[in-house]
Image: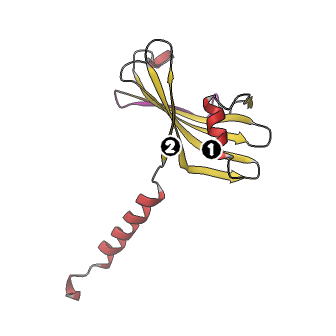
Amino acid sequence: MDKTNFNPVVAMSFILLLISKSTFASDWKYLTSQDIGDGNEIDWFVDLSSITKDGDLRRDKEKAMFEPFSRKGLNANSKKWERKWITTNTYDCQRMLVRSESMTVYYYDGTRWEDNETSYPSGWHMIADESTIWGRVLKIVCGSK
């Protein structure tokens, strides 16, 4: 190897790029599809790489994907078509509770709406049934206490 062509700045940039790619990678696990009553479905996912633990609490990111042009936004976004939601949720494994910390809605026109201050965190909700979306996620994130 000709050492005159070695550029330490380029080498370091390449190493940082490799590290950042692996650090921010997602591992979305498919949970289920849910019929929303109008012939369209929502696909639900949990990001296994986002799960963090703090005692009995687990925090994760979840995603809902909508069929193209099947769901309109709300309020000021009512003329836009929703593509997906990404939410951050916290689960209490001991008491079987969940609360939402933040939500971002992505639209097909490339815009997004974030709510992490006005409505969040939400209050705690009881998870009564493991067959619900939150119940399925609870089983995954709390499975390895």
Mark 1–mark 2 CB contact (< 8 Å): yes
The residue pinned by badge 1 equals 140
Q: Is residue 122 magenta?
A: no
Q: Amino acid at mark 1?
A: Ile
User: Between marks 1 and 2, how big is the CA–CA gap?
Assistant: 10 Å
Q: Nearer the viewer, residue 35 or 80?
A: 35
Q: Nearer the viewer, residue 80 or 44?
A: 44
Q: Residue at x 36, y 19 (%)?
A: 69
Secondary element type, mark 2: strand
Q: Residue at x 32, y 79 (%)?
A: 8
Residue 116 in sight: no
Q: Amino acid at mark 2?
A: Lys
The residue stretch that appears in magenta: 109-119
Q: Quadrant of residue 46?
A: top right
The residue pinned by badge 2 equals 29
Q: Residue at x 56, y 42 (%)?
A: 61
Q: As drawn, is 85 to the left or to the right of 120?
A: left
Residue 119 in sight: yes
